[in-house]
Each structure stands twice: as C-alpha cells, then as structure tokens.
Image: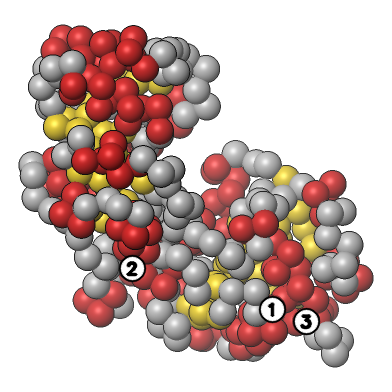
Amino acid sequence: MVNNIAALSGLGVRTYTVLSPDSAIIPALSGLDVEIIPFGRFRDYLHAGAFLKRLVADKNIDVVHTFHNRAYKMGVLARLMGARCRLYINRGVISRPNAVFFLWTALADGVIANSMHCAGILRAHGVMQRRLNVVYNAYTGPDIPADPSSEDEKGGTVRFVYAGNVARIKGFDVFLRAASALCQGGEGDRFEFVGVGVGPLELERFPEQVSPAVRERLRLTGTIPHQQVLAELCQGDVLVLTSRMESLPNALIEGFGQGLPAICTSVGGIPEVVRDGFNGCLCPSEDADCLADKMRLLAADPSLRTAMGKAGRAVVRTLMTLEAKGAALMRVYAGERVYGPLTLDEVPLNKS
C-alpha cells in the first residue's frame, strides 16, 4: 500500500487511505500527500460497505484499490450498494487464495499482482485472465553513490547479508547451512554473516544448522527500523535470499537499490528480477551447497560483485522506479490491461 501511495503522490494524484486508527502503516505514510481516514469496523462488512459508498460520493473518488481481504469485500459491497467507482483488488502473496476469491474478483474491475508468478497462481485458482494485471513494486530508498565501499574500508571482510525473518518459507535455516558449508576448510576468517531482522534468541531455534565457525562470524540485528535495514544493506557486499516461497521480496529490490549483487533461490517471482550471471546468481530451493558455491564465487571476485551490483542497481533505477509504477497504475485505473514480465534485456548498464 505504501509503495502505491508513494507512486501516486509523485504524480500529484489525490489519494485517500482508509486505515484502522492503530494501524502500523500510518507512520510510514509520513511525508506523503495522502489523507488518512480512520475506520475501525472492517469486520462489519455491511457497515463498511455503506461507509465506503458514502466516502466515494463525498470525496468524488474515481478508483478504489484494496489491499487485504476485508477491504476487498468492503469494496465489492460498496459497489453492490451503488458506489460509482472502479474497483481493484491487490494481491502480493503467492499462498493459495480462498475457495471463493475468484468470485469476489469477478465483481471487481481487475486484480493487481506484483509478479507474473503471483498472477499465475491466481489464474490457476479461477481468476479470469482478462482481469489480471502485473505491476511491480518500486524502489523507494535513497539514491546511493554508484561505487560501493572499498575492501580496505571493510578490512578485507566479505559481508553476506540475509534480510528477512525466521518463518520457514524465508529459509533462514538454509542460509545458515549455506554459510556453514562456505566456512568449511578454514575459509571462514574472510567472511561475516549478517542476519537483518533476526534476533539472537531466534537463532537458538537452529542448533543443527549453525556451525561454530558461522556462530563466531554471525551478527544478528533483531527487529530494526527500515532506515537501519537500508543502512545494513548499504554496508553489505552480497545479499543472500534463501526463500522456499516468495512473490517478489522487497528486500531484493532494496538490495539492488543499494548496489548489492544477489544470491537467491529460484522461487516465485525472484527469477523475474534476477538473471543468473547478470545481476546475481540463482540456485534451486533448499540447495545450500549451490548457495555456498555462489557465495564463494562472489567472495573471490570483487570485480564480479561490482558488475552484478551495478546491473541490479540499473534494474531498479530504470524498470522499478516510482515513476514507472505510478504510470503503470494509472494505465490500469484507466481500464488498460498491464500484463507482462520486466524487460531486463532493455536495461542500460550505464544507468547506475
């Protein structure tokens, strides 16, 4: 939601957002041109639908874009009650939708997914092809210098950054196994492993996956503010994402924005943004040995890390900007169908 509002604000589009008064999203909207309308009765569907119908009329709203299951039901009911607006349902996860989700989408003007893979999951579960759109998220972080920190500044250490949590689908255990494989043979002194978003107590859930060598070289940040997440990425050398299931992780977009090459499992929408050998490396899901081999490859070749990092940065600076996302959303809202993968072949490598 925040990504969409930022994109629309950049175009000067008047935007409203209906949120629970205690929503954790509210602080993230600071500085954006959006009017926050507090509403706490999303579970009362008939009341919520009537509320949205009045809001559409009072504010002359043309488009309603919903972001969770109670909100899209609220939107559909408002339409059935007579609200005059276009209605879009956002879906950014790849878990199987509920059995009647396709019926709700049939009553909307369209569905917006954040990857082709996510759209494919929806199509497989009954959402009509002609209602599906794909609008990729945008990079919203700072514009960092193109040249990464030098090896001298980092004392010759190569930092591998994991950004996520310890949910099974994120594969933190796979990251630990890959790091342990990398440190075999006495190579570990050259490496540092950073777990962004993972706390020390959570590490104790993985006693069999973390070797003594990795434990000595592992730094865990715990939960930290988003600006600190970006700072950790900026100080890293390689982003490692070891998910078992993904649509398109924001950590990947932000890592590219910070100029990092990415080593990822080839799941979900990740291969739509990562091309093996161009801006990163891809490995099969669960393959810790492959991940370790790719980590070893990039650790040994600073020039390759720099080239891949520049390529990833060029991807987000050309194809995944707020301007590009805002333009795509406006095309969808106007009734045009936006559907297709990112065109990585068209990325100018001097745009970094």
Q: Position of residue 43 (x, y in %)?
A: 44, 18
* Percent coordinates x, y for residue 146 in the rendering: 42, 67
Q: Amino acid at mark 3?
A: Ala
Q: Amino acid at mark 2?
A: Val
Quadrant in which the N terminus appears: top left
| Residue occupied by mark 3 | 181
Q: Nearer the viewer, residue 103 or 279?
A: 103
Residue for badge 2: 315
Badge 2: how crowded within 10 Å, few (<14), some, or many (20+)? many
Q: Cβ–Cβ below 8 Å for labels 1 and 3? A: yes
| N-term mark: 1 or 3 | 3
Mark 1 against mark 3, which lies toward the viewer?
1
Residue 235 appears in view = no
Left or right placement of residue 157 versus residue 43 in this view: right
- Residue 28 appears in which quarter of the rendering? top left
Number of marks present in the image shown: 3
Asked whether, in this view, residue 284 is left or right of residue 211, the answer is: left
Where does the C terminus fall, quadrant-wise?
Answer: bottom left
Instruction: From this view, report whether residue 223 is shown above or below residue 62.
Output: below
Residue at x 76%, y 68% (from the top left corner): 176
Q: Is residue 179 left or right of residue 115?
A: right
The kind of residue on which mark 1 rests is: Ala
The quadrant where residue 18 appears? top left
